[in-house]
């Protein structure tokens, strides 16, 4: 037995005789007058309850004064059956709890004995039960494997219990029950090797004390195949302590079917033979061995054929199916045979073996009619025309592939006529669009009749409201051209064989279309219809074709507010531009947007276009732009016939902008660039940051101001990252003298501001957000020393054996740190290689081989795979002493050999005079070779197809290297997974990784640009790693690798390959304005016509050039306005290639010899004859795109800052001149400058990049052009079986120094004169440092620049403070100061100090004088041993200030040097004030609470306890929940549940009525609702959704919302639920666990709301409430409360409520679930938030729960994140529950005043006026603070509401109580410390570092939790990332569990803030560096809920002693 006794004072202990008195009290309690006794009104848990975490007792009156959570306990808790630990506490005056350290396991019996002589605070004796008992019951199953579904005949069942269960009881209480077997089947225990094998397969790793928590069972009889069975776990399963289960539990399974083989093939109809063109497959119901599978044969007339296997499959992998590849001979009979005695992997014989050998019949080849480019293609007018022949004799031919169709196949055509009458021209494009859209919509799809009618009528089919089960009609079964005027019959060549009626053989024929224009062609075939449609009716095959010799190419780009476009018209046959073509731009409905004519280069430009890219047109089904071009018959290039062509703006497949690896932005609105210039970007809390803001829009020509129609941002938003805390300011924009636009603002950072990053942004009236910069607020010390650390001798570090280091340290104010001792460490880590000009290349080293692994089919990997350590320490604290100049050298030896690029991180640590140990850091790249290899390729390719691979060789600086040998090696990475049977239906998977070397696939040398390209062919499918290997001149190797996925032919589901992109390679990556950029076009054409376009926001410049394959280059002169970058594209066109044999000279060449020779030399070499499937000589195009950087001379300002001197005395004044010029030397007349003068030491910690205005405004711009071309739609010629004939167509003494601000001056508006000059005075402060004076200039809208100069403040003798900025009371520490002699003479200096503790009446304390001799140019450290004073009297004193005044004077010299400083040091308590307890109550109308300061609470000097009582008042707990409404307003999705939840959350009757009108369309035939509208009866609704809708709508009505379901609809839904509960409807869906009973309970709860639930419905549900999730438990309680005829209803209701209470833990003023993790049943739309909302709503209806409603409401609201819960269901239920709570408790608005009085305490009465209350989230609230009564005295706090309403009061008790032992009040926290660096083992010294590990255990989920861990005074928390941080010291920090929203590193403590911390464990690690020697107090480590600080955990910390550095 374990007995747990909460702590009691000795004087309160009583003897056992109190037991008799307790019994007497119990008797008296039942007698009249017992109201004078104290009673227990709530005890939890009682009876048998599983998963107990807390014992909670509520009394009917105050038992202790509020304030001491560790007051004498009212009871003792003792348990047997397990070792139990925990902690007791008083939550408030009435509520006491005992928190167990962990959930109690099963088999535990506990007794809670009330304390003898227990009395209330009023003196009433306790009268009630002397003891309470509860037990946790027997063991229950928490996990079963298998979890359900199909099992094997000899299946082993693995059961995991929630605690130990005795093996014998498990065996005896369990049996199997199988369908067809009428008797129970006993089970056996699986043990020994079998058990180990199964546990290994399951990955269930058991600790020594967990062995008996898992039992493996098997039925003693083999189970019949196909039978349903149950594993029944009866009552009597026992724990070792003897407690047994009382309930029966059943697990449902189905035994697998017998082992069978099934044959499949594709057939035209069910009874037809197999199609010979498709595979034949044989599938098995269970896997067989590969060896057996290889003996399966298909016998064909040509011999036996073996099955095909995956080539990369493991030889021992089991086989589930085999297939035989087509084609097969038609009209033959095949035989499929399997080996005799075939068995599966579990040894079962094939049950249908008698079917084999199996005869398989092959059908004839199926009929086929197919157009190659359906639904649309472009036909070349002159594609069939030989050279020298007349066009009329060679019309365009539309190819069609035919097989086994009618010989006299009918075809029709219709032509959208070119305009012959002028007034019809506008309509022509409209007709083409309509027909084009129509053919696309009706291409190989299916629609309902209503949808077809809408399409044919030019309407959208999506608007059609189809009736349920409306049949779909295949578009292949209807004709498009029947009855269409102008449709004509087309001739298809006839067969010439005798009879002419036989079906056609496989052939490609051409249908002549002699007329230019748009045609629709349709073929009708009854044979196709009979074969493919399955009915004796024609099947229609159709396409649209454009016959033309024109090609239209279209570029669409961003414009200033609208779109711009460029059309280029060329010919198809020779690729030449077409001048004077009429071009029209239309939207997808045909509306004319713009028109024009092409110039001599075939170009037409358009501006100011509406953006219709995303507009969808209902009449055509199209979107985007339609661009047409026309030439008349008399046009020189028309050849006598009017011609037209068009292009759609989305014809860009394969050449989309994103494919070119450049940033893209195709938005129509110009980018707005806003940048903020900060005076400083690193500040302390309490300082003021000043800002100047610049705004511009980016245009094609540079910059402009926002347009008149674009509103300027009117609000400045400053937001803290992590917490989301926001500050807003209005902003006033102004125009500068030269036309710019700027604004200024300041922000006073609150003294209590959160530390971290603050972002600055702007928003306009449309809520558009523009980010403009950020700054940091941190606690830091300014460094006194600065320095540089250089590794190497200046060049790149290439494979070094040793590395020389040069170190230099100097004072920021100037002068070396002579003789400074430093320590040097170095770390080698992996490097990510990237070069700015080679973004698309990979420089990553090849991957290392992976190890084999194994897994099982039920459970995935645990995710804890250790990762390789990518860091290695190569030097550790090497000592070095600097010379007299502050310099030193050191060599790192024995550097490891490199096989890949690495980063060498070098750090030097030293003691800075400011009191910190600081670090200088340098990161240097190290290279394995003098060249760096890179590689680039596509991400996928098909087997044996050519893959272009690009390699590059650079030097370590990223410059290209020519003539470098590069080889490409391929390595296949093969991963196989083999399933292996273990035992009893369990399997494991062996995952094997193999690397297969495919050898060298390419070799070569780089060109002048460092590039090498080759095409490789990869024979292996799967993942292949391509490795580029380059060698430098010394033979050293550099490798880079990338992976490509190689697919087998034909298995791509996402589209085929695309080769329409080409490389466009600039000669160099960056050009200055005025230079000529040269680009190499890597095209596959010998000759081409190319459109060269300079593009960015739009098309900036174009030219049309002829390209020659011998020198394919283009040149572009670079303009200044193109900075910072621009894109150049080349669209290269090649006309049709024609066969030019030598003898053709005699047929036509002699007439045109020059043209013949050019054709013979070019076209003839490239020509490839067309085949039946492809035409490689058709007109072709390629598009290339390249980006170049452009110098910033067009935007730059040269800014020069010149001070009159370089050095000044403190408080001197510097005269500074600013001169701003343009790059050409002209003055920037009347420009404007923002000037800042900042301490250089601040910039050492964090540079201010906001001053770089030019770089900020001139950021890389995105590519904003989209290119489309009709060239990709060309069909091309074919080799025809027959050709038809024409047949119609259709980003001295010194002053006391005390002014140390980091900012000297900020002036955002320095106006330059006409010469671009300005002069300013900069006043210096008391800092001895160097200041940087920065001028940031702007001129007009597009000129920017900055310049700077430095000045120093110095003096002969300098006194530098090293005081810790913060100390705690009674800390003992070394007060360090540094005396520096900057002269060339020796000084003898005397230093004195005076210390003034906080409090005005305290006299300063003088410290002993010190004298020290300081050599010339050196410094000496002095110090005093100091003790921190106590804070002055005052109950609320949380901090104070210690004033130091220190003076140093040169001794023995009149008028000698001196210095004097005055410093402040923060003093904080060693034991801080914390919330001890809190209570929440409603003033109805008063509240009376006894209070007393906690025992042991610290008092001030006057004896008054520190802290006091805080009374927080709220008019409402509920509030208006604006966050929920905003969440729903922004919610984007719209399934039925989401629509319903949204309407309820918004209380929107209109939305609800619209939903209920449509609701019948969501109900299936059973009345169950579906998430989306049902299209046919085959779709089934969801019982879960139906139950949710019924329940939430009923709850809405209870909340007073007019949101009812129609009676008829409700009745149908209730009928469906009833059928589901009774088993008449089955809904089987995937679930992670068995959930049928949970779903039935949800349905039953919904029915109980309307009285339709009946007790008999419980017959199919196992009543196991202790094992249900909380959602089901809530449903059960609701059902029990409503259905009166349930047997044992009262008993069951009491039991269920006890179980529910046991799952709740009292967390201060909140109630929270302790079972949260297991309650997230997301697939049933259930989780913790929803449960909390439902419990609150339920508590309002249940007697005995209303006292907890306020705590439940507080807990529910506390779960919100940013004002809302996380799901639609939780927000709907949460809003309803809070609404109902407000109706019950907050009916009357609060007014008047609330008076709070501490009776008997002088001056302890306060009044709160509700008329002056502030509002938080719309709720009136405020607070009152009162002092404690004197120590040891009690008082009564009275709060009285004097007015209307019932406000809520939260009373919190604050006190400073020393902690002697860990304390848990909802959280538990432990702290451990390990040394990272310790100079003397076992003790701490100045300069040491240690690692802190915090482990947190949370009892419940909570939002906004803070973890606070103290650090000793003067210490530094590493990891901030500021300039003196150490990366090496912090390596290896780990974090587990929750992740913080933000972290604060303060001089007091590390604080981590969690937006959400779930129940369970979390771990935090961080690193501390000790800077001061002394003895330091450390307050307790604490974790607490920020908005419920009475929920906390704390651990005491011992004082820390730190010695001087040895």
Image (cartoon, rainbow, N blue to C red):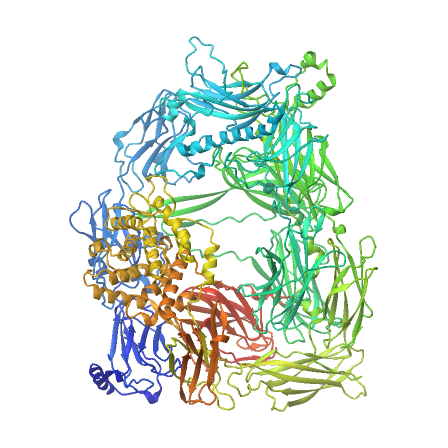
How many discs mark residues in the rendered view? Answer: 0
Is 1316 drawn above or below residue 1585 in the view shown? Answer: below
Residue 48 image point, x, y percent: 25, 68
For image coordinates 69% across by 89% down, the residue present is 1409
Residue 1235 image point, x, y percent: 74, 65
Residue 1466 image point, x, y percent: 59, 80
Is 1625 drawn above or below residue 1297 in the view shown? Answer: above
Q: Quadrant of the N terminus?
A: bottom left
Can residue 1510 be seen here? yes
Outermost residue to the left: 182
The answer to whether residue 1377 is left or right of residue 483 is right
Residue 2003 image-quadrant placement: bottom right
Residue 577 image point, x, y percent: 69, 28
Residue 874 image-quadrant placement: bottom right
The answer to whether residue 89 is left or right of residue 769 is left
For image coordinates 61% across by 84% down, the residue present is 1442
The answer to whether residue 1718 is left or right of residue 1657 is right
Can residue 1062 be seen here? no
The answer to whether residue 1438 is left or right of residue 773 is left
Q: Which of these two is toward me, 349 or 262?
A: 262
Q: Quadrant of the C terminus?
A: bottom right
Is 553 drawn above or below residue 1786 in the view shown? Answer: above
Q: Which of these two is toward me, 1729 or 1141?
A: 1729
């Amino acid at each position: 037995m374990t007995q747990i006794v909460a702590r009691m004072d000795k004087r309160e202990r009583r003897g056992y005789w109190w037991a008799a008195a307790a019994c007497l009290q119990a008797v008296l309690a039942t007698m009249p007058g017992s109201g004078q006794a104290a009673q227990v009104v709530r005890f939890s848990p009682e009876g048998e309850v599983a998963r107990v975490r807390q014992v909670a007792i509520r009394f009917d009156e105050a038992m202790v004064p509020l304030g001491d959570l560790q007051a004498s306990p009212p009871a003792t808790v003792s348990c047997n059956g397990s070792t139990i630990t925990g902690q007791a506490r008083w939550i408030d005056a009435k509520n006491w709890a005992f928190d167990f350290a962990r959930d109690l396991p099963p088999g535990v019996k506990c007794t809670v004995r009330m304390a003898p002589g227990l009395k209330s605070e009023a003196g009433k004796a306790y009268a009630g039960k002397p003891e309470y008992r509860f037990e946790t019951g027997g063991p229950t199953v928490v996990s079963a494997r298998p979890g359900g579904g199909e099992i094997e005949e000899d299946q082993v069942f693995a059961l995991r219990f929630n605690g130990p269960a005795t093996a014998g009881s498990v065996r005896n209480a369990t049996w199997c029950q199988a369908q067809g077997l009428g008797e129970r089947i006993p089970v056996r225990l699986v043990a020994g090797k079998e058990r180990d094998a199964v546990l290994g397969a399951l990955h269930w790793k058991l600790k020594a004390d967990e062995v008996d928590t898992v039992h493996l069972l098997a039925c003693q009889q083999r189970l019949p195949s196909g039978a349903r069975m149950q594993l029944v776990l009866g009552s009597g399963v026992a724990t070792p302590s003897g407690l047994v289960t009382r309930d029966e539990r059943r697990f449902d399974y189905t035994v697998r079917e017998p082992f069978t083989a099934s044959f499949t093939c594709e057939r035209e109809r069910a009874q037809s033979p197999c199609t010979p063109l498709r595979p034949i497959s044989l599938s098995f119901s269970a896997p067989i061995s590969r060896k057996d599978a290889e003996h399966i044969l298909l016998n064909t007339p040509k011999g036996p054929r073996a099955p095909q296997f995956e080539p990369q499959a493991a030889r021992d992998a089991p086989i589930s199916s085999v297939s035989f590849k087509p084609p097969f001979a038609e009209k033959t009979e095949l035989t499929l045979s399997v080996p005799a005695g075939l068995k599966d992997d579990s040894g079962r014989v094939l049950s249908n073996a008698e079917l084999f050998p199996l005869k398989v019949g092959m059908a004839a080849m199926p009929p086929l009619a197919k157009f190659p480019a359906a639904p649309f293609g472009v036909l070349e007018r002159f594609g069939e025309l030989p050279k020298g022949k007349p066009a009329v004799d060679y019309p365009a031919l539309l190819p069609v592939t035919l097989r086994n169709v009618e010989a006299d196949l009918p075809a029709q055509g219709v032509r959208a006529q070119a305009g012959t009458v002028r007034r019809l021209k506008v309509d022509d494009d409209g007709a083409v669009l309509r027909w084009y859209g129509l053919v696309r919509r009706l291409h190989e799809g299916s629609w309902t009749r209503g949808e077809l009618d809408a399409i044919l009528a030019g309407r959208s089919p999506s608007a059609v409201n189809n009736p349920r089960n409306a049949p779909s009609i295949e578009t292949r079964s209807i004709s498009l051209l029947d009855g269409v005027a102008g449709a004509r019959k087309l001739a298809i060549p006839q067969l010439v064989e005798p009879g002419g009626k036989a079906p056609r053989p496989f052939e490609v024929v051409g249908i002549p279309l002699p007329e230019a224009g748009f045609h629709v062609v349709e073929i009708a075939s009854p044979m196709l219809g009979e074969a493919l449609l399955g009915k004796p009716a024609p099947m229609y095959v159709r396409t649209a074709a454009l016959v033309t010799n024109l090609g239209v190419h279209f570029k669409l780009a961003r414009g200033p507010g609208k779109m711009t476009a460029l059309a280029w018209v060329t010919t198809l046959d020779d690729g030449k531009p077409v001048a004077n073509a009429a071009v029209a731009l239309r939207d997808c409905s045909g509306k004319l947007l713009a028109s024009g004519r092409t110039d001599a280069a075939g170009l037409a430009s358009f501006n100011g276009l509406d953006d219709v890219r995303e507009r969808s047109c209902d009449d055509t089904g199209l979107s985007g732009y339609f661009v047409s071009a026309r030439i008349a018959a008399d046009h020189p290039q028309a050849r006598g016939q009017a011609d037209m062509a068009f292009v759609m703006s989305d014809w860009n497949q394969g050449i989309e902008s994103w494919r070119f690896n450049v940033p893209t932005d195709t938005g129509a609105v110009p980018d707005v660039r806003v940048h903020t210039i900060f005076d400083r970007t690193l500040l302390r809390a309490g300082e003021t940051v000043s800002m100047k803001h610049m705004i511009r829009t980016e245009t094609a020509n540079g910059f402009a101001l926002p347009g008149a129609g674009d509103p300027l941002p009117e609000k400045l938003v400053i937001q803290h990252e992590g917490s989301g805390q926001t500050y807003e300011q209005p902003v006033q924009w102004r125009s500068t003298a030269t036309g710019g636009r700027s604004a200024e603002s300041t922000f006073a950072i609150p003294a209590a501001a959160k530390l971290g990053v603050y972002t600055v942004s702007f928003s306009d009236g449309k809520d558009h957000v523009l980010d403009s910069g950020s700054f940091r607020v941190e606690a830091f010390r300014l460094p006194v020393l600065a320095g540089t650390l250089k590794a190497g001798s200046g060049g790149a570090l290439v494979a070094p054996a040793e590395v020389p280091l040069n170190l230099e340290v100097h004072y920021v104010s100037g002068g070396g740190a002579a003789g400074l001792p430093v320590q040097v460490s170095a770390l080698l880590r992996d490097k990510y290689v990237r070069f700015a000009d080679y973004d698309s290349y990979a420089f990553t080293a090849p991957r290392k081989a992976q190890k084999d692994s194994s897994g099982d089919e039920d459970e995935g990997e645990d995710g804890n795979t250790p990762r390789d350590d990518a860091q290695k320490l190569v030097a550790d604290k090497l000592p070095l002493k600097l010379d007299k100049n502050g310099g030193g050298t050191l060599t790192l030896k024995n550097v490891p050999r490199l096989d890949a690029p690495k980063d060498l991180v070098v750090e030097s640590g030293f003691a800075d005079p400011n009191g910190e140990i600081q670090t200088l850091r340098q990161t240097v790249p190290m290279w394995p070779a003098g060249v760096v290899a890179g590689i680039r390729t596509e991400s996928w390719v098909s087997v044996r197809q050519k893959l272009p691979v690009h390699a590059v060789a650079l030097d370590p600086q990223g410059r290209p290297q020519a003539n470098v040998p590069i080889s490409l090696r391929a390595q296949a990475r093969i991963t196989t997974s083999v399933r292996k049977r273990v035992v009893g239906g369990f399997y494991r998977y062996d995952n094997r990784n193999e690397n297969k070397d495919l050898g060298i696939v390419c070799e070569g040398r780089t060109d002048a640009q460092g590039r090498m390209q080759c095409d490789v062919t990869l024979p292996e499918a799967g993942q292949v790693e391509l490795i580029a290997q380059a060698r430098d001149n010394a033979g050293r190797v550099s490798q880079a690798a990338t992976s490509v996925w190689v697919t087998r032919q034909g298995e791509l589901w996402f589209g085929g390959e695309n080769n329409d992109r080409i490389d466009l390679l600039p000669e160099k990556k960056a050009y200055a304005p005025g230079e000529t950029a040269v680009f190499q076009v890597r095209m596959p054409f010998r000759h081409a016509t190319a459109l060269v376009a300079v593009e960015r926001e739009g098309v900036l410049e174009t030219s049309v050039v002829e390209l020659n394959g011998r020198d394919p280059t283009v040149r572009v002169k670079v303009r200044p306005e193109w900075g910072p970058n621009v894109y150049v594209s080349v669209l290269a066109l090649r006309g049709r290639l024609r066969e030019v044999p030598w003898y053709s000279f005699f047929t036509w060449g002699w007439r045109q010899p020059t043209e013949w020779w050019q054709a013979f030399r070019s076209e003839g070499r490239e020509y490839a004859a067309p085949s039946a499937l492809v035409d490689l000589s058709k007109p072709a195009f390629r598009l290339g795109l390249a980006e170049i950087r452009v110098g910033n001379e067009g935007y730059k300002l040269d800014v020069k800052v010149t001070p009159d001197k370089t050095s000044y005395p403190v408080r001197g004044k510097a005269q500074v001149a600013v001169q701003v010029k343009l790059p050409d030397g002209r003055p920037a007349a009347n420009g404007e400058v923002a000037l800042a003068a900042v301490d250089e030491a601040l910039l050492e910690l964090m540079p201010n990049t906001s001053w770089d205005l030019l770089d900020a405004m001139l950021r890389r711009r995105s590519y904003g052009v989209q290119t489309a071309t009709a060239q990709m739609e060309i069909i091309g010629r074919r080799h025809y079986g027959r050709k038809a004939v024409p047949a119609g167509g259709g980003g001295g003494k010194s002053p006391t120094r005390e002014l140390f601000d980091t900012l000297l001056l900020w002036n955002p508006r320095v106006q330059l004169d006409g010469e671009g000059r300005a002069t300013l005075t900069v006043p210096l402060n008391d800092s001895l440092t160097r200041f940087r004076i920065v001028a940031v200039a702007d001129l007009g809208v597009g000129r920017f620049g900055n310049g700077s100069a430095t000045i120093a403040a110095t003096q002969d003798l300098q006194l530098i403070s090293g005081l810790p900025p913060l100390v705690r009371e009674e800390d003992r520490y070394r007060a360090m100061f540094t005396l520096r002699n900057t002269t060339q003479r020796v000084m003898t200096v005397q230093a004195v100090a005076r210390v003034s503790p906080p409090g005005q009446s305290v006299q300063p304390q003088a410290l002993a004088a010190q004298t020290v001799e300081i050599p010339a140019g050196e410094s000496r450290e002095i110090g005093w041993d100091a003790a921190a004073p106590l804070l002055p009297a005052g109950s609320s004193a949380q901090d104070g200030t210690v004033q130091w005044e220190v003076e140093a004077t040169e001794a023995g010299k009149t008028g000698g040097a001196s210095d004097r400083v005055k410093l402040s040091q923060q003093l904080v308590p060693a034991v801080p004030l914390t919330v001890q307890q809190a209570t929440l109550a409603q003033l109805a109308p008063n509240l009376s609470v006894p209070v007393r300061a906690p025992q042991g609470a610290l008092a001030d000097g006057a004896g008054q306890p520190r802290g006091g009582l805080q009374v927080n008042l709220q008019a409402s707990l509920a509030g208006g929940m604006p966050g929920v409404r905003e969440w729903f307003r922004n919610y984007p999705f719209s399934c039925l549940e989401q629509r319903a939840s949204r309407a309820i959350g918004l209380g929107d009757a209109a939305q609800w009525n619209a939903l209920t009108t449509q609701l019948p369309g969501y109900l299936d035939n059973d009345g169950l609702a579906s998430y989306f509208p049902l299209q046919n009866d085959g779709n089934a609704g969801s019982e879960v959704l139906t139950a949710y809708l019924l329940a939430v709508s009923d709850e809405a009505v209870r909340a007073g919302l007019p949101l009812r379901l129609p009676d008829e609809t409700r009745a149908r839904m209730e009928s469906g639920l009833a059928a589901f509960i009774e088993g008449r409807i089955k809904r089987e869906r995937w679930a992670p666990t068995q959930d049928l009973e949970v779903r039935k309970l949800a349905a039953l709860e919904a029915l109980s709301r309307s009285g339709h639930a009946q007790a008999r419905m419980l017959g199919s549900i196992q009543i196991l409430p202790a094992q249900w999730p909380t959602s089901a438990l809530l449903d059960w309680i609701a059902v029990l409360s409503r259905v009166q005829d349930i047997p044992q209803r009262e008993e069951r209701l009491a039991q269920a409520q006890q179980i529910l209470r046991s799952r709740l833990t009292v967390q201060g003023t909140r109630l929270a679930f302790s079972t949260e993790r297991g309650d997230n049943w997301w697939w049933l739309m259930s989780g913790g938030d929803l449960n909390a909302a439902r419990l609150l709503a339920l508590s309002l209806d249940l007697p005995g729960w209303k006292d907890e409603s306020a705590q439940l409401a507080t807990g529910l609201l506390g779960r919100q994140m940013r004002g809302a819960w996380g799901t639609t269901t939780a927000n709907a239920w949460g809003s309803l529950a809070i609404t109902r709570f407000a109706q019950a408790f907050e009916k009357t608005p609060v007014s008047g005043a609330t008076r709070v009085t501490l009776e008997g305490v002088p001056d302890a009465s306060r009044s709160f006026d509700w008329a002056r209350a502030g509002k938080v989230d719309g709720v009136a609230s405020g607070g009152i603070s009162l002092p404690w009564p004197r120590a040891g005295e009690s008082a009564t706090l009275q709060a009285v509401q004097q007015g209307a309403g019932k406000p809520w009061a939260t009373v919190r008790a604050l006190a400073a109580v020393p902690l002697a032992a860990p304390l848990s009040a909802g959280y538990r926290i432990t702290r451990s410390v390990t040394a990272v660096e310790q100079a003397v083992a076992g003790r701490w010294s100045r300069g040491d570092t240690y690692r802190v590990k915090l482990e947190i255990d949370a009892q419940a989920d909570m939002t906004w939790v803070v973890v606070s861990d103290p650090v000793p005074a003067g210490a530094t928390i590493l990891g901030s990332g500021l300039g003196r941080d150490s990366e090496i010291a912090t390596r290896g920090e780990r974090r587990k569990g929750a992740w913080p929203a933000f972290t604060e590193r303060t001089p007091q403590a590390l604080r981590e803030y969690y937006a959400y911390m779930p129940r369970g464990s979390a771990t935090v690690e961080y690193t501390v560096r000790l800077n001061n020697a002394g003895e330091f107090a450390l307050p307790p480590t604490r974790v607490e809920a920020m908005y419920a600080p009475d929920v906390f955990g704390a651990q005491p910390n011992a004082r820390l002693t730190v010695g001087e550095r040895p």
